[in-house]
Image: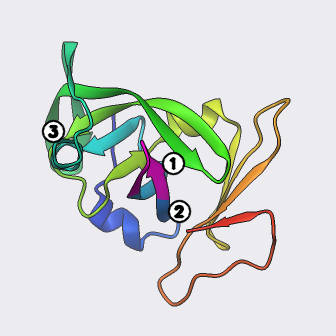
Amino acid sequence: MYAAQTEEAAAAEDVVAGIILLDGIRVRALFDTGASHLFIDRLFAVLHGIPLVSLLYPGHVVVPDHTLDIREFCPNCPVRIGDWIIPVDLLALCKLGGFDVVLGMDWLTKYYTTIDCKNRTVTFREPGQTEVVFCAWMPEFAFCDDDRLVSS
């Protein structure tokens, strides 16, 4: 597995960051095409009472310069983006560099996601479902001029 370090990713032009709901809690999320899986900051999960379950087979995540152990995950956490709610399994990592959740390629691909980095939007086009467009925050300002968009 590979996960981008979020300190670097936040400044990158190939990711989108914003606020979403996880189990009814506002979280700082990073939609990251460079991350292989879905991750949650372990301390965030503990502080918010999100249940952690031991992995049957612990693993590792490779980040630049080192490897992190993964021993726990948060199963079936409901992610809400606009009116769209989907349960996800999040691997727990000790540090996500300022983000609470990282949503990586396995999940983004599953829901036919398109990331528009220039406009800082994430579009979900699951077949047979209504298209959902998430408009993320941008460093200078955050607004969207489309009533379909979900503002962070």
How far is disc 2 from disc 3 in space, using C-alphas?
Answer: 23 Å
> In this figure, which residue is indicated by the disc labeled 1?
33
Task: Give percent across and percent down for residue 44.
Answer: 22, 50
Residue 54 vs residue 36: left or right?
A: left
> In this figure, which residue is indicated by the disc labeled 2?
14
- 76 is higher (above) or lower (below) than 32: above
Q: Nearer the viewer, residue 6 or 87?
A: 87
The residue that appears at 42% across and 56% down in the rendered structure is 29
First in residue order: circle 1 vs circle 2: 2
Callout 2: helix, strand or loop? loop
How far is disc 1 from disc 2 in space, using C-alphas?
Answer: 8 Å
* Residue contact between numbered discs 1 and 3, judged by CB atoms under 8 Å: no
The residue that appears at 17% across and 51% down in the rendered structure is 95
The residue that appears at 25% across and 53% down in the rendered structure is 96
How far is disc 1 from disc 3 in space, using C-alphas?
Answer: 19 Å
Callout 1: helix, strand or loop? loop
Q: Badge 2, how many Cα within 10 Å: few under 14, some, many 20+?
A: some
Mark 1: which amino acid? Thr
What colour scheme has been applied to the protein in the rendered image?
rainbow
As drawn, the residue found furthest toward the bottom would be 140
What stretch of residues is rendered in magenta?
A: 20-26
Task: Give percent across and percent down for residue 14.
Answer: 53, 62
Mark 3: which amino acid? Thr
* Residue contact between numbered discs 1 and 2, judged by CB atoms under 8 Å: yes
Q: Quick one: quadrant of the N terminus? A: top left
Q: Badge 1, how many Cα within 10 Å: few under 14, some, many 20+?
A: many
Residue 118 vs residue 40: left or right?
A: right
As drawn, the residue found furthest toward the top would be 56
Q: Quadrant of residue 55?
A: top left
Mark 2: which amino acid? Asp
Q: Quick one: quadrant of the C terminus? A: bottom right
